[in-house]
Image: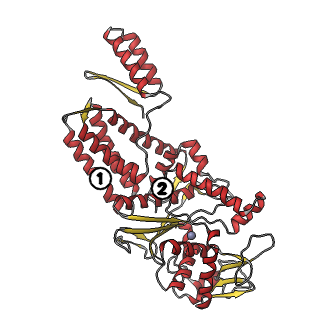
Amino acid sequence: MVYNTLTKRKEPFHPLRPGEVRIYVCGPTVYDYIHIGNARSFVAFDVVRRYLEYKGFKVKFVSNITDVDDKTIRRAKELNITLQQLGELYTEAYFEDLKALRVKKADVNPRATQHIGEMIALIEKLIEKGYAYVVEGNVYYDVTKFPEYGKLSGVKVESLIKGARVEVDPNKRNPADFALWKSRKPGEPFWYSPWGPGRPGWHIECSVMSSIYLGETFDIHAGGKDLIFPHHENEIAQSEAASGKPLARYWLHNEWLTINGEKMSKSLGNFITVRDAVSKYGAQTLRMFLISAHYRSPIDFNERTIEQARRNLEKIRSSIQAFRRLRELETQVEGEKELLAHVEDLRRRFEEAMDDDFNTPKALAAIFDFISELNEFTGSREGVSRETKGRVLKVIEELLDGVLGIETKVEEKEVQGLSPKLVELILEVRNVLRRRRDYETADFIRSKLEELGFVIEDSASGTRWKFKG
Ligand SMILES: [Zn+2]
């Protein structure tokens, strides 16, 4: 089931073409580094994509780059560089940030400035069909001509007109009309068009780029909640007026991310860029934090919630690492059958959660329950049969690495500044000392290792270690 903003309810998910899913996610406006609120959207819909792929769908994923609009033009002027230079700079940075967050690359990242010709063609079509009008080199969309205007956001044209929620522009027939083409202003970049030099409006960009790469109707259109109105409402008005077909079957929107309980805003100065958060907390911790809430629930970023995410990540990883370190045996040991039952139960609960509108916190709860079982198994055994080990790790990798994008195969080269091999060597030496009954030195080594963040457990079957946490 998928919650559809268009119908305001959860619906069974059926793609237009069986076995194939086409997704469009509104990408960034490349005028600055992306912030963690943007990242929430990109990570949320990356999980959606990964889960659909896990379920066997062939996914085509398109996410645009808005490299011309008011913000980019203003910023390029401020920095005294060309629009193109600005676009290249922040598009590159955006790709780096997504890569750090393990967001899979889109199949296509179309850039608005490379599709101006198609935008002009769509605007011409809208004029021809009577949905748009030209005033002094500008082209506007007449919202009163599209009876379904407001069907996504619930916004009523009349209240827009009365309430003047939009800026007053003497060129517009109705205050709620929006620009498809903006005539050239001095000092601004421009393209030639049948209405004179100018540039496209932001909304037309997405209408054009989605249809070029995904067709007139595709399956999922997604983005942040802030895009519902006017951006997505206007996309619908443009695309559906031109094609006479629905633009997207399912509209998915993620909720806000707040910082210390407040909305991120320029005026409050509480913007946190992805790169700052990554360098301070780690990309995987940030990703863990972002998926810890359901995408349609608000999430608050603060020291406590990010610390919780760090701990959860460490808990999962150290548990899986300890299991990975178990010696591989030819035959099964006691308890393996139960462990395999737990891992199947994990898969079932995980899928049940994700099938219910991609409920990641519920899926994570299933993982934590399994982790407890896994710890119990690993804690009292020296080895596990090769087959069971392989089967358990396969499920973990499919769900955690594959769907949630949480890396479980962390290089054990260096943890807490020490290589695990070295820790094992130290423990070996310590065991020699214990056999020689030099308990004083053995205890000294143990307490030093504990200071470094390791837990050392001696038992009849030997000595094992793990990370504190
Ligand atoms: Zn868009």
Q: Secondary structure at mark 1?
A: helix
Q: Work out whether residue 260 can be spotted.
A: no
Residue neighbourhood size for the residue with mark 2, other residues' Cα within 10 Å, grouped as few (<14), some (14–19), many (≥20): some
Residue 79 falls in which quadrant of the image?
A: bottom right
In this rendering, would 183 be left or right of 449? right
Q: What quarter of the picture does the N terminus occupy? A: bottom left
Q: Position of residue 323 (x, y in %)?
A: 32, 36
**As drawn, 208 above or below 254:** below
Residue denoted by label 1: 347
**As drawn, 184 above or below 440:** below
Q: What quarter of the picture does the C terminus occupy? A: top left
Q: Position of residue 232 (x, y in %)?
A: 54, 74
Q: Position of residue 288 (x, y in %)?
A: 46, 49
Question: What residue is shown at x 33% (from left), y 12% (from top)?
Answer: 434
Q: Nearer the viewer, residue 399 or 89?
A: 89
Q: Work out whether residue 384 can be spotted.
A: yes
**As drawn, 257 above or below 126:** above
Q: Residue furthest right?
A: 186
Q: Secondary structure at mark 2?
A: loop
Q: Nearer the viewer, residue 221 or 285?
A: 221
State the mark number for residue 104. 2
In this rendering, would 6 be left or right of 81? left
Q: Nearer the viewer, residue 96 or 42?
A: 96
Disc with the residue nearer the chain's start (2 vs 1): 2
Amino acid type shown at disc 1: Arg
Q: Is mark 1 within 8 Å of ligand 1?
A: no
Q: Give the total number of marks visible in the rendering.
A: 2
In this rendering, would 396 be left or right of 90? left
Closer to us: mark 2 or mark 1?
2
Amino acid type shown at disc 2: Lys
